[in-house]
Amino acid sequence: MRLYAIPHSTNVERVALALGHKALDAELVVCDPADRSVLRAVSGQDLVPVLDDGGTIVTDSSHIIEYLEQRHPAPALFPERTAERAHVRLFVSWFDRVWKRAPNAIADELATPQPDPALIGAADEEMRSTTALVTEMLDGREYLAGEFGAADCAAFPFLKYARGAALDDDDLFHRVLTERLAPFAADGRLAAWIERVDAHSRRPDLG
């Protein structure tokens, strides 16, 4: 297997966590963020991650994790019971469609010549409320769905910025995450979860 990545990609790290949990090896192909021609040649689009499994090309981090679960079901990333699997899939969808909306909106607005303070303020409030909900899911739990799995893979690469970013990471979106999540670092539930997930799985150095 080959995993195509760019440095510091949160979505690539989702897949790396899943690979590490399943003890699967994949050759990491790090691409230049300014030149997506390799990605385009492999997958017909410009986004990471891209998984090449012996010629089967899978894009989108959530789709890749589902693919890995189907091809390599043990150790599992989804609960065995149908209803519990559905809950995990709902969380992943909610995280992508709702939680990520606010930091993306803030980053997009900050990139404009004249950012709108009202829009940023509303997105700040949304991000605080949705992050508080995720933190409450960790009350009395070690992982978001009880056992380590796809929900943790989906959320960790973003929520880990509560403890700061790498010194060489100058990505605007990651700066937004670091600044807005910093107040949550004092919450022991989230801080302990970040440390548990970080220690849970070996994964490639994404540089």
Image: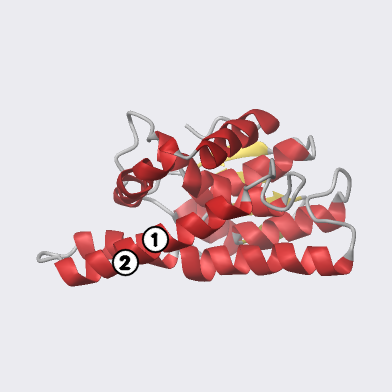
Q: Please rate how many residues cluster around mark 1, counting C-alpha atoms within 10 Å: few if below 14, some from 14 to 19, many from 20.
A: many
Q: Residue at x 58, y 31 (%)?
A: 195
Residue identifier under label 1? 127
State the SS at label 1: helix
One can see residue 47 in this view: no
Whole-Å distance between the Cαs marked 1 and 2?
6 Å
Q: Residue at x 74, y 55 (%)?
A: 55
Instruction: Identify the disc placed on residue 90.
Output: none
Disc 1 marks a residue whose amino acid type is Met
* Quarter of the view holding residue 63: bottom right
Q: Dots 1 and 2: beta carbons under 8 Å?
A: yes
Give left or right: position of 76 versus 130: right
Residue identifier under label 2? 123
* Quarter of the view holding residue 61: bottom right
Disc 2 marks a residue whose amino acid type is Ala
Depth order, front residue of 200/133: 133
Where residue 71 appears, as percent x and y from the top left, is 85, 54
Image position of 149 with respect to 167: above or below: below
Depth order, front residue of 42/156: 156
